[in-house]
Amino acid sequence: MRIRTTTAAIAAVLAVSIAGCSGDKGSDSKADATRSTAPETSRAADNSDAAKKGGLPPEPTGAARSAALQAIHDVNGNLTHDEDKAIDAARDQCAALDGGATNPDRGAAQRFSYDGIKLTDDDGGHLNHGLRKTLCPAS
């Protein structure tokens, strides 16, 4: 009798757990909806209203792109191995700078710390200085 009661209790807990997991789809849908309305950093979204409202500068081309990549490269040459990733991070950082980020140097250091590269807040300050001179001058 005790085994049947224990088994029934375990089965009930598992059923509630499984139902709880499937019930979380609403929060995933909400997260998906939030993600879909957030500004995108892809080239396809460059001219979209969401990108403009999000403070993203247009994707640089030609000399402007070269200048931004050089500013990033001056801080750490490994950051520009993937130029598109570096430009996307730079555009996101410009949006943070123009949006009044509370600690932009730390934000830049975190945003550009990818592919095994770890930057300091001081590096982030240098990145911000370079981005302000190239991709996103202060308004």
Image: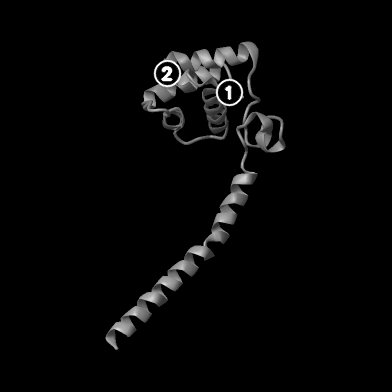
Tell me which residue sits at (55%, 31%) in the image.
Answer: 92
Q: Nearer the viewer, residue 108 or 83?
A: 83
Residue 67 rendering spot, x and y as whole percentages: 56, 12
Q: Which mark is residue 138?
A: 1
Q: Is residue 54 above or below residue 80?
A: below
Tell me which residue sits at (56%, 27%) in the image.
Answer: 88
- Under mark 2, the amino acid is Asn
Give SS at disc 1. Answer: loop
Q: Residue furthest top?
A: 63
Q: Nearer the viewer, residue 85 or 21?
A: 21
Of pointers 2 and 1, the one earlier in the residue sequence: 2
Residue 122 rendering spot, x and y as whole percentages: 38, 23
Quarter of the figure that contains the C terminus: top right
Q: CA distance from mark 2 to mark 1?
A: 26 Å
Q: Residue furthest bottom?
A: 1
The residue labelled by disc 2 is 78
Tell me which residue sits at (43%, 68%) in the image.
Answer: 17
Residue 62 rendering spot, x and y as whole percentages: 64, 12
Residue 49 rendering spot, x and y as whole percentages: 71, 36
Colour scheme in use = one colour
Are circles 2 and 1 on residues that touch, CB within 8 Å? no
Q: Nearer the viewer, residue 67 or 26?
A: 26
In this picture, residue 70 sits left or right of residue 57: left
